[in-house]
Amino acid sequence: MSSTVQNILQKAVDGQRISKEECLTLFEQAKLLEVGKAAHAITLRKHPESYRTFNIDRNINYSNVCAAVCDFCAFYRKRNDPDAYTLEREELYRKIEETIAVGGDQVLMQGGLHPEYKLEWYEDLLRDLKQRYPQVNLHAFSPPEIWFFHKLNKLPLQTVLERLKAAGLGSLPGGGGEILVDRVRKAITKNKCLSDEWLEVMRVAHQIGLRSSATMMFGHVETLADRAEHLDRLRQLQDETGGFTAFICWTFQADNTAMADVPTVGSHEYLRTQAISRIYLDNFDNIQSSWVTQGSKIGQVALFFGANDMGSLMLEENVVSQAGTVHHLTLHEIKECIRELGYEPRQRNVHYQLIEEKELPPPAPKSVGPLPILN
């Protein structure tokens, strides 16, 4: 280890804040095990408890119609495409009830930027779901969606968020962050919010009492300096609002996208980037493993590279899977991943509060085939 890298890592492990320039030095010079050891030391300082957490939710993509054009996305459709859809309410009810049946307390609802639905459509949706399922947190609408609602309805951003919150919105997912550098965003997407706009949605959401996660999708056209810039912008906003509950990063999944020729970033770089994120984001309490894109073994190893949370059981995932990623874990497998590392698995909610798991019926015999919820 070079003395420069060693000094930076020791500084972070000791609880001191490192600079953006030092973060870039780690990206450029530090080796995987070096940053992994430091990130794990920081995790143990922040989370000395004997457990590691997970949650149970479902990613419901209520519509795939989108006015934006993202070269990295294999999911979106234009409204006249034959496979464009918006889910009927009965289908939404079924998905939520299946989630509740296996102990879930949250649904993550995201769609495209639908050019026809006004704010009232979303308010009616939230009110309906919250009235039917008051115990379920509606973790819904990424910043690009919220910004689009703001522009389409010609309403102040705060008004949009306050109306959605009053209708039942519980928290915001951190989707659509990609890389918070406008040069990168303009290169890979059109008709979608830029960096300042994404951050402004989160700022206003935090100011009115909503909490959110933060994300980074890397391994495409960004530079290492862009990754450092992205982390710095998140850390600055967290200093200002304290509204982010967790950070999740994952590698770009290229299959079936307009960027299919971009070389795949592997697990080595995923673990290294997550570890550096844990080191730099000193004001974030929680880092989630991304087993959905990396698989169970790397997702498990991630708990030694800065993560303290295995993320969601995720009963359903449609966006990343359209790009060729098909990793699935059962609730038992998630718990075993945690237990094998010597920790107790504990279920938590969106605010990282521990919740008691409900006693569920035993799994059906294998002879009857997979449960319908996992089809």
Image (cartoon, rainbow, N blue to C red):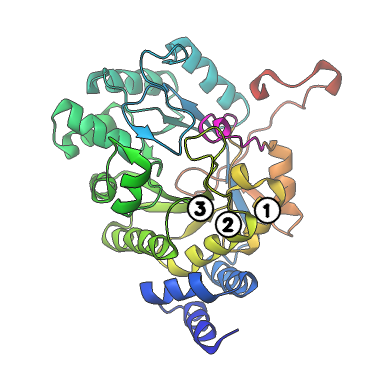
Please state the horizontal and vertical placement of residue 10, each as a whole percent of the image.
52, 83
- Regarding residue 18, the answer to whether it shows in the image is no
Which residue is denoted by mark 2 in the rendering?
270
The one of 132 and 95 positioned closer to us in this rendering: 95
Under mark 2, the amino acid is: Tyr
Residue 169 falls left or right of residue 364: left
Q: Tell me the quadrant of the picture where the C terminus can be found.
A: top right
Counting other residues with Cα less than 10 Å from the Cα at mark 1, is it few (<14), some (14-19), or many (20 or more)? some
Is 276 a magenta residue? no
Label 1 SS: helix
Task: Determine whether 30 is above or below 203 in the image.
Answer: below
> Of callouts 2 and 3, which one flags the residue occurring earlier in the amino acid sequence?
3
Task: Determine whether 223 is above or below 70 in the image.
Answer: below
Task: Determine whether 309 is above or below 125 in the image.
Answer: below
Which residue is denoted by mark 1 in the rendering?
298
Tell me where the magenta segment starts and ends, as one range: 315-327
Which residue is denoted by mark 3 in the rendering?
219
Counting other residues with Cα less than 10 Å from the Cα at mark 2, is it few (<14), some (14-19), or many (20 or more)? many
The one of 71 and 100 positioned closer to us in this rendering: 71
The residue under the point 38% across, 61% down is 226
> Of callouts 1 and 3, which one flags the residue occurring earlier in the amino acid sequence?
3
| Tag 1 near tag 2, CB within 8 Å | yes
Depth check, mark 1 against mark 2: the one in front is 2
Label 2 SS: helix
Counting other residues with Cα less than 10 Å from the Cα at mark 3, is it few (<14), some (14-19), or many (20 or more)? many
The one of 301 and 42 positioned closer to us in this rendering: 301
